[in-house]
Image (spheres, rainbow, N blue to C red):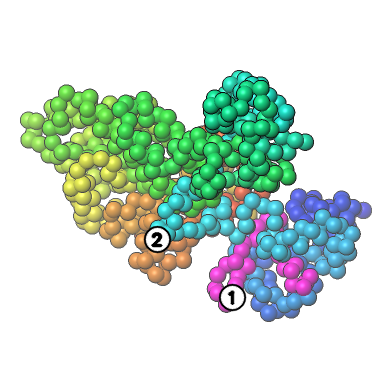
């Protein structure tokens, strides 16, 4: 009779390295020796300086944290399919880290005595483990180290390296290589360059680059009569060829051209003349790449004369965003740069629309960006949320004043729509009279929300309270912020209702941290990244920062970082929330760019195991911050 349990173990193990390198019969034999261990949450698996067990472990369900006890930090978290505790056995050493369960777990304990013979007979298995130990990662072939969420571990100091924003962008080069041999007549080369619309011809021998002829060579050596069109490539080509690797940044390419006083670089597989050429990089290619630099983009935005001219510049922002994500730039910096560009687009549209108005604004006003743009978290082309507040006017002038600003707002929202910001489905835009009113009108509106905090009122206030000024009078915005805090202080029960709303979003995970997906509708079986992860974190940050009477900080991770300063006893969880939010926003942005949508709904079958595990690591943080909210604001009182 077959051992069905061992077969289940084998089916699990073969899905993950290093076991996936074993033959089926080897996995089945090994699985018969495996012990199944159940551990409660926060239970020790092994401790520092403990003699290594005669088994190592792989996580079947749950998660295990590896702690550096001396530094009191979590070095790594082992998720489904990860192995741990093997290195000490191979090194015949004691444990250097403490392994403790993050939640209830099912572990497979694998006897090292049964595993050791497989290392000798399986070269791939041995190589994998050697590589993983050398690189200090469990999977050396993953794109980023497991201990870091979505690779958000890149660090640099932008104040010390002002060129970094250029440097991180890969240059785009011409890949449609046209080449000839050294005996080809110049006349033929000129004809081919004209036909293919290229500025340089590569000269090769045995498919390796030996020279290059550019437009400049034709001008200086042929047009001047120095050589006739019947001369050969060998006579006028620049040789030896200056080559570089195909992976180059804008700054590296600029420096290479300046250093060698040339206008074209030949890019090869390994960066030398001993490998096949893959492309030619020209100064024009660099200029095109420079167009994706934020400072160049913003200058271009400010010079536009029409909304139509803004559209391609706004599109270039997405290319810039892709470059930053590919280079693993910290999400906090990426968000600030993209938000600045978005803000520049908004300002320029407002300026252009003001020029189309017959009269100047009758009174001072301010344009407020709300929602994700107000929080400086709008990475992709999502819908617009905005409002317009203007100075108080006498009652008999209110109607005509509002009509002026409504006309202006309709032009502005139309312009924003033209460059890629969809209209808000709920009509929460300044073109709606409700969101285009005087400072007193907004005060009355917020007082109603705060004093009558029903579900609809709370939802409206949440979007509105995440505002930032995009254009106009600072005093109006400061006045409104001051009034909001004053009203909240008078009606503290409002924060309890806001806290209650922060707990309404469903949990991201179910039993054993399985993803909770949509049960029906258009996005059935998909995971709602916004509602189940990002919104709970941003909602919690908002109510906590408001409880400290602080305005002027609308960004979610900056709110958590400020909270960490204000509440040192909760510093760890607040910083964890800051990190988790940035990681999740980065993940959503990547998904949106890959799938050409908002990145909100995720098809789990398209994610790698690593991506799923990294997502799950944020769930614990979400649960902890919601527990803190529930206890602090006594949400049960209103339920």
Image position of 5 (left or right of 599): right
Query: Which label number is shown at residue 298?
Result: none
Badges 2 and 1: C-beta atoms under 8 Å apart? Answer: no
Residue shown at 59% from the left, 47% from the top: 515
* Residue toward you, 604 or 92: 92
- State left or right for residue 392 relative to residue 148: left
Residue 218 in the image: x percent, y percent? 57, 28
Tag count in the figure? 2
Residue for badge 2: 561
Is residue 144 or residue 518 the one in the foreground? 144
Where is mark 1, residue-wise? 69
User: Residue at the spot x=20%, y=35% of the render?
Assistant: 437
| Quadrant of the rendered image containing residue 148 | bottom right
Give the answer, above or below, for where 618 lies relative to 358: below
Quarter of the figure with residue 303? top left
**Residue 516 in sight:** no
Local secondary structure at mark 1: loop
Q: Is residue 638 magenta?
A: no
Q: Position of residue 131 (x, y in %)?
A: 74, 60
């Amino acid at each position: 009779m077959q051992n069905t349990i061992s077969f289940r173990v084998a089916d699990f193990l073969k899905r993950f390295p290093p076991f996936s390198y074993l033959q089926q019969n080897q996995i089945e034999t090994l699985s018969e020796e495996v012990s199944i261990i159940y551990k409660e949450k926060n239970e020790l698996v092994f401790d520092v300086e403990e003699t290594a067990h005669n088994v190592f472990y792989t996580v079947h369900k749950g998660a295990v944290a590896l702690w550096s006890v001396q530094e009191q930090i979590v070095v790594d978290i082992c998720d489904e399919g990860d192995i741990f505790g093997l290195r000490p056995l191979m090194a015949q050493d004691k444990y250097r880290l403490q392994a403790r369960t993050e939640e209830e777990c099912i572990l497979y304990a694998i006897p090292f005595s049964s595993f050791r013979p497989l290392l000798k007979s399986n070269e791939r298995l041995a190589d994998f483990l050697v590589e993983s130990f050398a690189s200090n990662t469990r999977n050396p072939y993953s794109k980023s180290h497991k201990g870091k969420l979505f690779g958000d571990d890149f660090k640099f100091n932008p104040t010390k390296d002002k060129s970094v924003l250029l440097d991180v962008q890969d240059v785009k080069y011409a890949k449609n290589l046209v080449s000839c041999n050294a005996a080809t007549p110049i006349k033929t080369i000129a004809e081919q360059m004209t036909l293919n619309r290229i500025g340089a011809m590569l000269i090769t021998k045995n498919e390796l680059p030996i020279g290059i002829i550019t437009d400049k060579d034709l001008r200086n050596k042929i047009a001047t009569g120095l050589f006739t069109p019947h001369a050969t490539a060998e006579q006028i080509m620049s040789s030896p060829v200056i080559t570089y690797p195909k992976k180059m940044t804008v700054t590296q390419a600029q420096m290479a051209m300046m250093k060698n006083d040339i206008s074209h670089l030949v890019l090869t597989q390994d960066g030398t003349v001993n490998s096949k050429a893959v492309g030619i990089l020209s100064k024009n290619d660099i200029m095109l790449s420079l167009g994706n630099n934020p400072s160049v983009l913003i200058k271009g935005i400010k010079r536009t004369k029409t909304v139509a001219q803004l559209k391609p510049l706004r599109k270039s922002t997405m290319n810039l965003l892709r470059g930053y994500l590919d280079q693993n730039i910290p999400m906090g910096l990426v968000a600030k740069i993209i938000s600045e560009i978005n803000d520049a687009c908004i300002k320029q549209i407002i300026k252009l629309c003001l020029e189309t108005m017959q009269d100047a604004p009758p009174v001072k006003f301010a344009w407020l960006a709300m929602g994700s743009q107000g929080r400086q978290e709008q990475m992709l082309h999502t819908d617009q949320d905005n409002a317009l507040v203007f100075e108080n006017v006498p009652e008999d002038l209110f109607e005509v004043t509002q009509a002026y600003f409504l006309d202006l707002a309709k032009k502005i929202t139309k312009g924003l729509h033209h460059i890629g910001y969809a209209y808000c489905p709920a009509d929460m835009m300044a073109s709606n009279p409700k969101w285009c009113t005087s400072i007193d009108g907004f005060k009355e509106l917020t007082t109603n929300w705060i004093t009558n905090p029903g579900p609809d009122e709370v939802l409206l206030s949440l979007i509105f309270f995440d505002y930032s000024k995009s254009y106009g009078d600072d005093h109006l915005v400061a006045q409104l912020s001051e009034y909001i805090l004053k009203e909240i202080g008078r009606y503290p029960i409002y924060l309890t209702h806001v806290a209650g709303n922060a707990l309404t979003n469903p949990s991201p995970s179910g039993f054993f941290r399985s993803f909770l997906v949509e049960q029906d509708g258009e996005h059935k079986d998909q995971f709602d990244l916004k509602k189940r992860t990002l919104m709970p974190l941003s909602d919690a940050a908002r109510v906590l920062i408001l409880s400290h009477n602080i305005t002027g900080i609308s960004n979610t991770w900056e709110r958590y970082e400020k909270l960490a300063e204000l509440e040192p006893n909760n510093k760890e969880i607040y910083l964890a929330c800051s990190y988790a939010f940035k990681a999740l926003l980065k993940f959503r942005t990547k998904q949106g760019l890959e799938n050409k949508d908002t990145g909100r709904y995720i098809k789990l079958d398209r994610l790698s195991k690593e991506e799923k595990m990294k997502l799950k690591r944020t769930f614990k943080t979400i649960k902890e911050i919601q527990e803190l909210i529930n206890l602090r604001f006594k949400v049960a009182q209103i339920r």
